[in-house]
Image (cartoon, rainbow, N blue to C red):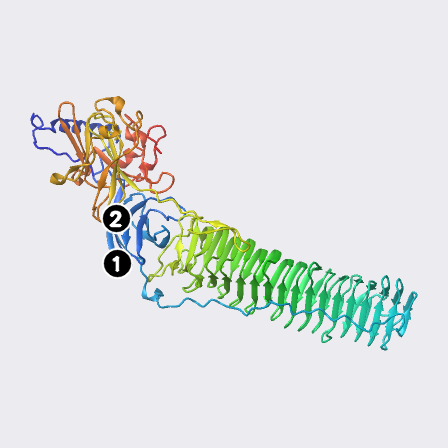
Amino acid sequence: MALGLVAVSCNKMDPFNPYAEQEIKQEEFTNNFQTEVLNGKSVDANQTWATTDAVQINLTPNQSGTLKIYTDNPVGNSVASLYTATVTANQKVSFTVARPADITELYAVILNEDELIISIADIDASAEEVTVDMSETTSSNRAARRAPAVPTYTTFGTTNPITKPDTPTDLPTADNASVKITQNTTSEWGYQNGESVYIAPNVTLTITQEWAAFKNGKIYLSRGSKIVNTHSTKRIYLENCTMYNDGGTIEGYVNLQKSVVWNLGTIDSKGTDFYSNDNGTSIIYNEGTITAKDFQVGQQCKLYNVGTVTCTGTLKGNNSSSQIYNGPGHNMTAARLELNNNSQYLWNDGTLTITGAIYSTNNAICVNNGTLNAQSFDGSAGISFLNRTDKTVNITGGTTITNANSLWVNDGIYNTGTFLVQAGNSQVFNNCRLNVKGKFTMGNNDGSRFVLQGDASVICDSFDWNGDNYFFMGGGSLLKVANTLKSNNQNSDKGFFQTRSDEYAVITAKAITTDYPTGQWRAWYEGKIYIDTDSHFAFYSINDGQKNYKLTGGATLTKKQGTAPVKWEESTCRPAYNGNKVESDPVMYYYYAFEDLGTTDDFDFNDVVIRVSAPVNGKSTVTLMAAGGIYPAVVTYGTGASMRNIGEEVHAAFDVSTGNTDDMVNTGGKKKEFVTLGTIENLSANADMSQLPMGITVTGNNGQITRVECSVANKGKAPLMIAVSGYSSGENAGKWFWPLERTNISSAYTQFGEWGANASTNKDWYKNFTDGKVYKWQ
């Protein structure tokens, strides 16, 4: 691409030759150009004076839609498209793009009607011709494969199975008790022969032996009365007994065997334990205050709290079929909670606070119908856990579900520091809002499953996907990652699935990355999911048509976070999401900058500047940008008999006069809006946008004509025209800034001369301008 000189005579002195003056001036121009621009060097013989290289692309799309060719990953970047065309799935297309010579990797992207990405592939564009197959190979074609079944679970926790114990009857009174304690009394061993014991108000019964016992009887404590064990073990042993505390105090290690404690007063274990034996079917009803170190509820035993229970150690369901209940408006506190055997049940209607860990084993059931606070939740040994609708769990540390038999269900608000689901077949169902302050970790290449139901959400700071697992999303569900989602999936048919609804789910993250960018199927998205991010790892083909990502079944990728086309208002189960459609891509333009030989020594290449838009379905627009010459000039397209003018004379188009330096436009003096001169229709798919037959015809004062046009025959000669691509991406995408009037282009672009003398170097010269020496437009 260079000067095309049209001459009707070889005699430079022929007065009938309209190009005679041009021939003389062009020789002057060539000599001056090598001196003033190339610093005395010769023009590279391979120099085309275009900043682009032509690449023919043969591409088979796997989706129907709008194909665009970009110089950079369009996700999170402002990138101008080099080529745009409508394509049909599996129908091969061939076309040429003029890529910036300093860029050798391109991206082929197919967009749907909402300008969302439905397919993307990288292209090594370093060769003159490249073949790109975006279709699926037989081994990865999943058209006939059904999506994996969404896990289900048997509903539980709809009704509290822990019933209030029957109030004890036939209690001892001052009238009928076999033992009436009406003054402070000391008993060595207690009462073990089935006595009915009545302790009068404000009276203390002191027991001195280790195994102080009450057996086979009933004990009634009046208000203000007290039972105290002064032995070092402080043990108070109940066997087959009912002890009714009607406002008194029990001090010591309470040990139950098939007994009932009905507490309306205070039980203070004095730093020791509260223990109901296995196989004891004991009942502890608390309407007052119980303080203990460890509190163990044995096999078939029940703790029913409608008061306050405080454990400095462990609150434990110690064997099968134990039951623990905390009533509405009441508090239970412990350093640790253990449900460590089969068929155990905990139901919380009040506030349950565990300053350490919640730990549970297989078949134990924990239902929160109030507020549950804990430092950590450990499902490593198996658990069935339910947080009910409109209820809250607060875990300051981590939640771990690491047992294949675990079942974790959240119907309310669950707040946790971190969250880990890691165990093949473990079933985790989030039906409302899961807030993770830190990292959400999915599996360890073990087939773990997480189900995010429709209209529910997971909100976390970061997300790690480790190996092959399943994350199911209902229609309308939201996975919101504040920072980075790391996806390290390994095989097909694992990943994120939306399989239940026509409504889209959304995955939104600041960035989506992988530790293995050259590994296959590192991110798999299937079903109607919007993947909404500012940055997604590059999209590579690995081998045999395998890729390192998958978009299928309606999954689409936005170009910028916050642009998935859905709008959700804030709700209990899901934060607000107001997707705003991303702005259209910047347009790639190719700038044709002409010298008209009005002078032969300024080399500012701004006498006429036009730009031609990258083709969209074979159509381009021609825009007049600058007129730094004073002679009448017309922009033309075509050669020979097919040549036609595009638009009117350039000065007239800007509504200024010719012959006046004050009417130079957009070169440092007068400023004008750019003017659309016309369009180029029916461009060939193989048209090189930097070698279109663009030209200008300039008429001098004496009628002499200067004709400058694109011509490959002038390769390696001093140029009267250069073709420059706009910036491919960034805030200046699609733009180029030409030199100001009388500013040598090698002064405006200091690398231009080196590039002119050696076309293989300084290929990005057009991006590196000198401030104050170019026309910087917005």
Left or right of 708 on screen, residue 554: right
Left or right of 417 on screen, residue 104: left
Q: Is residue 46 above or below residue 569?
A: above
Q: Residue at x 66, y 62 (%)?
A: 349
Q: Is residue 622 above or below residue 127?
A: above
The type of residue carrying mark 2 is: Asn
- The residue at which mark 2 appears reads as 617
Packing grade of label 2 (10 A; few <14, some 14-19, many >=20) is some
- Which comes sooner in the sequence, label 1 or label 2? 1
Q: CA distance from mark 1 to mark 2?
A: 16 Å
Return the residue nearer the eye: 278 or 717. Answer: 278
Give x and y (percent) for residue 226. 86, 64
Q: Residue at x 58, y 68 (%)?
A: 156
Left or right of 379 on screen, residue 17: left
Q: For the residue labelled by badge 1, is the local secondary structure a helix, a strand or a loop?
A: loop
Quadrant that contains the C terminus: top left
Q: Residue at x 32, y 37 (%)?
A: 735
- The residue at which mark 1 appears reads as 91
Q: Is residue 764 above or below residue 746?
A: below
Packing grade of label 1 (10 A; few <14, some 14-19, many >=20) is few
Give x and y (percent) for residue 775. 32, 30
Q: For the residue labelled by badge 2, is the local secondary structure a helix, a strand or a loop?
A: loop
Q: Is residue 764 visible?
A: yes
Give x and y (percent) for residue 390. 59, 58
Q: Is residue 211 visible?
A: no
Quadrant in the picture for residue 256: bottom right
Quadrant that contains the N terminus: top left
The type of residue carrying mark 1 is: Gln
